[in-house]
Image (cartoon, rainbow, N blue to C red):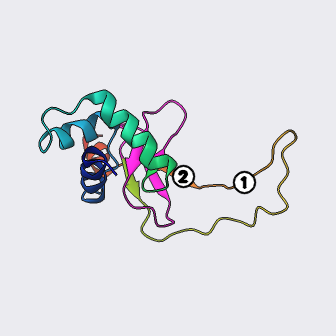
Amino acid sequence: MTKQRMVILEELRNVHSHPTADEVYGMVRQRLPRISLGTVYRNLDLLAESGDILKLESAGSQKRFDGNVTPHQHVRCTQCGRVGDVMDPVRLPDISGARAPGFIILSGRIEFEGVCEACASKN
């Protein structure tokens, strides 16, 4: 593991905000001022592929990253896009009998939508 990858992993594990790649770049630059945005993107992808972090992707939204890889669900604010952890995990239904023509189902996830406190207080 390179120094850059280790710093990115440490920064992600120290926050609970589910940052975007640009936000991770801003955090990491405080410790590694010469790191490039491309290096951060590449290392985030490598860390996600290796299972060290989670990459949260949702249609129409920026990718966000989570240093907590224990099984848990997320909630996304429909107004600002902020992502948070669901405190009481919900079990996935048994997907062993699920069928989708043309696909082999490997896994599933549940993502909740809501309005964060900051957006709710604005309205």
Residue 120 on the magenta span: no
Disc 1 versus disc 2: distance between alpha carbons? 17 Å
Q: Which residues are magenta?
A: 55-82
Q: Mark 1 is on which residue type? A: Leu
Residue 58 on the magenta span: yes
Judge the density around disc 2: few (<14), some (14-19), many (≥20) Cα neighbours within 10 Å.
some
Of badges 1 and 2, the one in the foreground is: 1
Which residue in the structure is indicated by mark 1?
A: 106
Query: Is residue 34 in sight in this rendering?
Result: yes
Horizontal side of residue 92 vs 55, given as left or right: right
Height in image: 122 above or below 92? above
Residue 4 sits in which quadrant?
top left
Asked if disc 1 and disc 2 are in contact, CB closer than 8 Å, the reply is: no
Horizontal side of residue 102 vs 76, given as left or right: right
Q: Position of residue 68 (x, y in %)?
A: 39, 61
Describe the element under mark 2 as helix, strand or loop.
strand
Residue placed furthest toward the front: 2
The image's mark for residue 53 is none
Count of picture labels: 2
Mark 1 or mark 2, which has the lower sequence index?
A: 1
Horizontal side of residue 38 vs 27, given as left or right: right
Judge the density around disc 1: few (<14), some (14-19), many (≥20) Cα neighbours within 10 Å.
few
Describe the element under mark 1 as helix, strand or loop.
loop
- The residue at 19%/37% (across/down) is 26
Q: Position of residue 59 (x, y in %)?
A: 55, 33
- The residue at 24%/50% (across/down) is 7
The image's mark for residue 111 is 2
Q: Mark 2 is on which residue type? A: Glu
Q: Nearer the viewer, residue 76 or 94?
A: 94
Give the quarter of the figure containing the C terminus: top left
Q: Nearer the viewer, residue 104 or 77?
A: 104
Magenta region, mostly helix, strand or loop?
Answer: loop
